[in-house]
Image (cartoon, rainbow, N blue to C red):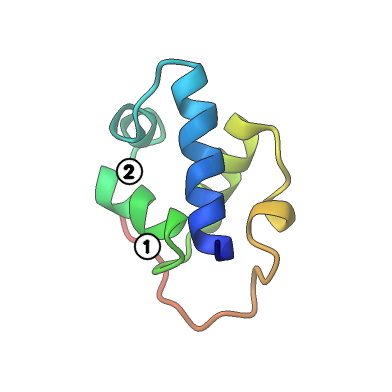
């Protein structure tokens, strides 16, 4: 399993344990579900979304996105 899929599964597990959907989580941080999903899948970057996901799951951003800052992916807009 690649890192993007593993990250998605970890986050879904943590959200599921708190009976929260990705859509509900996205709304709680002021972003759309597609924006959060794109960050989880590694298609886009957003320091704010990554930090919110890390805070919710108890992981560090660097643990979920080991190559944070090295990618050329576009920043997510609200």
Q: Residue at x 73, y 53 (%)?
A: 63
User: Image check: 60 left or right of 49?
Assistant: right
Q: Position of residue 18 (x, y in %)?
A: 49, 16
The residue indicated by pointer 2 is: 31
Residue 13 visible, this angle: yes
- In this view of the protein, can residue 32 be seen by the observer? no
Crowding near pointer 1: few (<14 within 10 Å), some, many (20+)? some
User: In terms of secondary structure, where does tag 1 sit?
Assistant: loop
**Residue at the bottom extreme?**
72
The residue under the point 39% across, 69% down is 43
Q: Position of residue 59 (x, y in %)?
A: 71, 40
Q: What element does badge 2 sit on? A: loop
Label placed on residue 5: none
| Residue 30 x/y as whole percent | 34, 37
Q: Is residue 30 left or right of residue 60?
A: left
Per the rendering, the mark at residue 76 is 1
Residue 53 placement: quadrant:
top right
Residue 39: quarter of image = bottom left
């Amino acid at each position: 399993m690649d890192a993007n899929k593993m990250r998605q599964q970890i986050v879904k597990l943590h959200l599921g344990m708190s009976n929260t959907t990705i859509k509900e989580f996205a709304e709680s941080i002021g972003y759309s579900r597609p924006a959060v999903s794109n960050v989880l899948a590694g298609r886009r970057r957003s320091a704010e979304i990554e930090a919110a996901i890390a805070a919710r799951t108890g992981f560090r951003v660097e643990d979920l996105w080991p190559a944070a800052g090295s990618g050329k992916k576009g920043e997510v807009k609200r």
